[in-house]
Image (cartoon, rainbow, N blue to C red):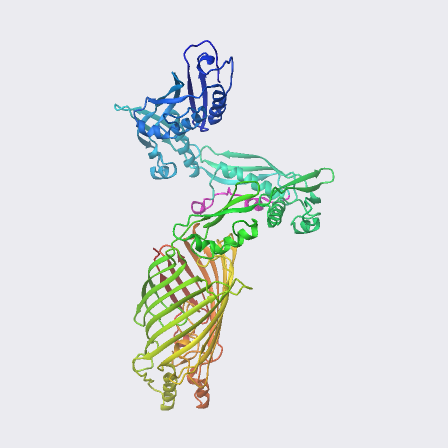
Amino acid sequence: MLKITKSFNKFFFSITVFYILSNNVYISAIIPATPVAQALGNTATNIAASAMASNAASSIGSIINNMATRKIINNIIIRGNTLVPTDTLLIKIPYRTGQVFDAALTGQLIKNLYGLKYFDSIQVEVENLPENYINLIINLKEKKKLESITYEGNSNLNIEEIEKKYKFSEIPAINQEEALLLAEQIKRLYQEKNYHNVDIKTELEITENNTILVKFNIEEGKKATVKRVNFQGNKAFNGKKLRSMIFTREDWILGAFDKAGTYDPIMVERDKQILENFYQSNGYFTARVIDVKTDINPNTQEMDITFIIDEGEIYTIGDISVDTHDKIDKEILLAALPVRPGQPYNKDLLRQSIEVLRTIWGQFGYAYADIAPRPMADFENKLIDIKFDTELGNQIFVDRINIEGNEKTRDWVIRRKLAINEGELITPQALDISKARVESLGYFDPQDGVNWKINKISDNLAELNLMVKEIRTGKLYGQVGFGGADDKSPASALKVSAGISDRNFMGTGIKYTFNLTFSQEDRGLLFNIYQPHLTLPWFNTPVGAGFDAYVRKSLYDEFKNVADIPVENVTGLIGNLTFSPLFMPNLSTIVNAGIERIHYNNKVIVEVPGQNQTERDLFQSIVNRRFEDGTVHWLGFITGQDLRNHPVYPSKGYNWSLSSKFCYPVPTSNFSFFKVDLDATWLTPLIGDSDLIFLLHGHAGFAKPLAGKNIPYRELYHVGGPATVRGYLYGQIGPQVFGDSIGAQKALWINAELIFAATKDQSLRGVLFYDGGAAWDTPSGAKFRELGLQDMLKNNRFNYRHSIGFGIRLASPPIRIDWGFKLDRNKRINEPASEVHFNMAQDF
């Protein structure tokens, strides 16, 4: 209360502040005591006012500033501080010597000093000096410095858990009231562990150094568990149905793992809302949970919780009306709404209708349209008429687009993905497309790494803030694998590789990889670099460009019937140009050209014990054509779309690619062929956004030699392994001679996966899979028939093989393990029942 009288002849006033700990509310009262006519140059009697927190300072300041001659601060005097240096306090005080005194800032002064957590009370005095100068005097009453906090009796709640939640160690000073509040916070932690009868006694001891020791004596009591969840008044839906929807669950044998049996009063309140919403979304307009009874056995601490429900009766939706504002036809709006006349009343559909109307009006630029459904009940006829009141406000345009959180990624890398520009109308569609495009970069957290925040700055202007949360895009990795890394790799033993890569080099969007691979069968060096966004004068759309350079040495030791293991040396260079047609911006097209030199260290001589000369000669001729030196000159064309929601951690969408490769004949090489591949993947979430995902992948390929020339061994299809059909080794599915894979011209494989999250943060995921495929029709297969030796050639016809299995995916360190089991194991040739495929990498 402010009281100003004429009965004093020395001007001063004081601000006394009381801090209400439980509500974080500041209460301040200003009491001046002078003849105000003398002190402030005006006359006033019996003026009174009161306010809370900074509002008090603001209103009081307005009164004083209106009444007073402007006063200049001569000095700021602080008294009573022993724990906090004066210089630190002066930084927190919003006044400076030589400034005009503004009483409205006293609220900020109080808030700033209390924020230091050292003071019980703060008193501010203003002493009048000649020539309109004043001294600002701040009297402080400090709390006692906190020496330590100790606990006794906390068997089921350790100190680390308390500290992690509340950071008690950061409290500088404390008083009795605050210590009691800390005890209540500890009780809340116990409640999360199902201890609801905890008693905490708080002891404060003052030391010789005038510091304070706090000790919490804890009696935990017994752990409580919810044994039964019951319902009363439920006629339309049985208890099993209602129980399945709420958070509070009955205890069972595995309750320690899934937290069943936990009692949480906050969750019980939420359960009430869930039950009411369920009923009101199934026609029961007046349904209410009128009470929740909790009965607890004092001896066992077992709890029975009973939800008492008043269902009411079913109501039907009558008339529906909407505001059109003369901008859109009423019938179009009504047709877009999921709620319809004649349906049972449905609160969920009402909410969905609000979002539909917001989206529609948002396309007109009304980003802040306020949609308020107004249900009007006819209780006699059990009808609900619904009126959607709409306040459009103004159309909102973009004033400025800000990007926050991109510490690595350059602004322009993100901005070139946006579908909205400064000065344009804000629409939900433009925001959603922009968000999806930025997410597709793969530089940001897949869970919640890209979000829009709209800051309205005037009636028709708003700032758009794109909030991004970056993830590490670089890898310094080592990998250990088994069974082949891709469908062209012959490796079937342990392989070690190391390298460095980054999908966003120095934040520019440039991708590069440098990889070194070593194994008993496969050694190689690869470097590639790719710039995804170049502007060329003869293109109307941005293009990407890059190149791959590689050296590879492969040992085909799966060939058992040869004198010496074939050793292939490959050196290659590929140039790529990527672009998207203007009429289909989501369609990616790649045109590439390459040259590859293939050389074998030695001539491959077959050794087939027990076979006749004709069979050996035929096999030798096939091997000679498969392992032939030469140079491959080729042109390639790849087109496809990637409409997955994330390139690294997708949970929905699809991608597909159609690729072709033409190795044109040259006089100096015996290689010429044409090859085409179709690959597609589709994902959809089954539970939540990414709790359970179904993935379906398929691949089909065809290769044909041209001009009577050969196809390199590596360009033929060898189905089996982690990238094709798990549970099999490289080339195990397809044409074979004496158990050796000689490659196929045609191939098909499919993969179906159920991917489930084992942890909330997706750091550990499990996979159940089904794989199947076939490879058939080897080049020169007709020779076997001509010589009557077709029995030598196995699996040259379509022979579908399949497997099932399971795997795990660990995010950090990145580990991938798949264990596939053959469904059609050939025991006659002693095929192994399963194969394990292992891969690991470490991000930096």
Q: Position of residue 656 (x, y in %)?
A: 50, 66
Q: Residue at x 31, y 83 (%)?
A: 603
> Can residue 769 be seen in this snapshot?
yes
Is residue 245 one of those drawn in magenta? yes
Number of marks: 0
Q: Position of residue 573 (x, y in %)?
A: 37, 72
Which quadrant of the structure image shows residue 273? top right
Q: Residue furthest front?
A: 131
Which quadrant of the structure image shows residue 221? top left
Check the image and report above or below for 523 versus 348.
below
Task: Give the magenta part as a residue range.
Answer: 236-259
Is residue 831 one of those drawn in magenta? no
Q: 241 and 325: which one is in front?
A: 325
The answer to whether residue 518 is left or right of residue 582 is: left
Q: Position of residue 239 (x, y in %)?
A: 58, 44
Q: Residue furthest top?
A: 7
The answer to whether residue 113 is left or right of residue 429 is: left
Q: Position of residue 6 (x, y in %)?
A: 47, 10
Check the image and report above or below for 802 versus 408.
below
Which quadrant of the structure image shows residue 604? bottom left
Q: Residue furthest left?
A: 208
Q: 372 and 8: which one is in front?
A: 8
Check the image and report above or below for 364 versus 732.
above
Please, what is the dominant secondary structure of the magenta stretch?
loop
> Can residue 559 be seen in this snapshot?
no
Look at the image and tell me in which quarter the C terminus lies.
bottom left
Q: 570 and 762: which one is in front?
A: 570
